[in-house]
Image: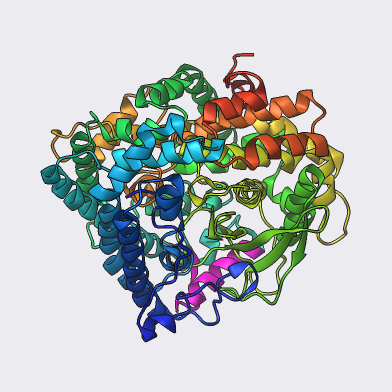
Amino acid sequence: MIARLLATSALVLAVPAAAQSNPFAKPSTLPYQAPDFRAIKDADYLPAFEAGMKEQRAEIAAITANPAAPTFDNTIAAVEKSGRMLDRVSTVFFALSQANTNDTLQAVETEITPKLTAHGDAIALDPKLFARVKTLYDSRATLKLSVEQAQLLKVTYQRFVDAGAQLSAADQVKLRALNTQISTLQTAFQQQLLAGTKAGALVVTDVKKLDGLGADGIAAAAKAAADRGMPGKWVLPLQNTTQQPALASLTDRATRQALFEKSWTRTEQGDANDTRATIASLAQLRAQKAKLLGYPTYADYSLTDQMAETSTAAKAFLTQFAPALAAKQREEAGEIQAQIKATGGTFELKPWDWDFYSEQVRKAKYDLDGDALKPYFEINKVLTDGVFYAATELYGITFKERKDLPVYDPDMRVFEVFEQNGTSIGVMYFDYWKRDNKSGGAWMSNFVGQSKLLGTKPVIYNVANFTKPAAGSPALISFDDVTTMFHEFGHALHGLFADQVYPTLSGANTARDFVEFPSQFNEHWALDPKVLSHYAVNYKTGAAMPQALVDKIRRSQTFNQGYSTGEAQEAAALDLAWHSLPADAPKQDVDAFEAKTLAGMGLDTAHVPPRYRTSYFSHIWGGGYAAGYYAYAWTQMLDHDAFAWFTAHGGLTRANGQRFRDMILSRGHTLDYGPMFRAFYGKDPDVGPMAEYLGLTGK
């Protein structure tokens, strides 16, 4: 499917009266066209999808039937304008299907996904439409296009080609069938994973088994059990990652092992939620699609529009760290095993022990207790006096809470965002607390995308899965959660500062190995002295975090990097391995393939399991990161390079922030990524600052 061809339209066509009354039939009348969640009902989605696809089919037919010679406006811009109703329903529906789903929405998703795939294929494989696009592309040197128009024409043409527009009619039939099968399986995986993750929660009947969690953690576990209809018990819901937060504090080793194993096998129970058959089929079908499109593997197909450009470059980037990572892991495992022995343990280190004893090592080496930090991180103060404050200092923007805009969950907060001169920029929604009907992880996306062509400003949301405190308890979070808040807001800034004419190129609509750059870069400000002192205050006393504690956090930044970097690299290697299978490879045994891949990395995978196991790797099987999980490490290189530039030029200043906004955050995909980054950094990206930060330089 061509990404963004399902976007926006300014045309108003005749639609049935029932569709006209649908809340998605016209733009919302709320400020910024924000979704009116008070008016939207579950029953509205399916008819809105059907009407939206019908409307866009008519719009595309009008473009291809135009007797006038192709021009940029009557073809490329006209496609950009098409599909407005479909875009409105899609952005809201898929936001809720991830963050606030239910049985009805899941049924709609199952029904509509193959239809959307077929709809996208019908546009991407329309020979008349592609002929008009190709005519413009072949004569692009004579069209006198703006920089953004030239980029859009290039991107649009390449997306048609990659979607199969140049295939024979017979091969296009095969491609349509493959796309439908793939999209259906992706939806099945998402729903299996959500159900398996919920069912995989650890149920505890003896509160003594939760020693170490603390009163607030135990109260949250009791509430989670009560919410599931299990009063008198305690439930530890699973996060999306392999390791679980409670593993760092649970003193009972058997409970730790039980929680880890629940996580590790959540979708490998041989039941309806077992994802392995779905994954094996998905990998095979993606390989077949790549071959049909002329690529040796799906990874080669997927990376054509990325900054890395080839799977060879992505793999080489990852493997360069393997020796240093392996040495770091051996060192860390040795320290943890010594800590186990020092505290009277006679057992061999296992994955469920790592977080618990590494926290003890951290305390011993740096005198740093993660629980001692939490009183300084009250979530609302972190947001307003940390995340927002840093954005104001860097970019001059300000925030005003809007309690009049409807939300889909009562815990959400909404803010309007303004330029320094008072001009409005857009709206931000925040949905932070974990729910059983919410997919794991954290993410950003748009309810409304920015586009001068369409006259729209950004309406953006951040979603996370922090553990909600029990009623009456303070909303305290870990420093990792703080970092997540800064990270996701970095994505939001990429969307808020969008300044494009055309929606395809707007904001965060960039390659996977570039889109994580602004978000990871924004994490650095969480520990900036000026920012940290503004938000890290004790929730009871109002006292600032003592400098000694701040220094301990800083000194501990390279601690456990063999583990945290290694688990991410292992996940990235799994992703690339799965998507480097040739089309004629037999269907894989998921567990055997995973074990073989991990064994070949040269890392300590026995003690450091991948952050995401194959069977619950939502990024690559249900999301858009297939063959692209390496992007987190790649963009980590970019973000450390950029922060090194900031450090060399005075750090957190308005001038530096404005330069970053002007040259990176506001550019969308209007320029190619290499030249865009070089213009800011002054040279090609290099791994030096990243390796130094991670403690992998051997110094």
Question: Which residue does the image show at 22% across and 57% down from the upper left?
Answer: 270
Looking at the picture, tell me which residue is in the foreground, 603 or 528: 528
Determine the image quadrant of residue 316: top left
Residue 320 position (above or below residue 32):
above
Question: Residue 632 vs residue 682: left or right?
Answer: left
Q: Residue furthest left?
A: 170
Looking at the picture, tell me which residue is in the foreground, 363 or 547: 547
Q: Is residue 218 in view?
A: yes
Question: Residue 29 vs residue 280: left or right?
Answer: right
Looking at the picture, tell me which residue is in the foreground, 318 or 444: 444
Determine the image quadrant of residue 521: top right
Question: Which residue does the image show at 74% across and 55% down from the upper left?
Answer: 382
Q: Is residue 254 in view?
A: no
Residue 231 in the magenta stretch? The answer is yes
Residue 358 in the magenta stretch? The answer is no
Specify how the rendered protein is coloured: rainbow
Q: Locate the C terminus and report the quarter of the image it occupies.
A: top right
Question: Residue 661 vs residue 174: left or right?
Answer: right
x, y (%) of residue 350?
Answer: 43, 38
Q: Which residues are magenta?
A: 216-236
Residue 16 position (above or below residue 399):
below
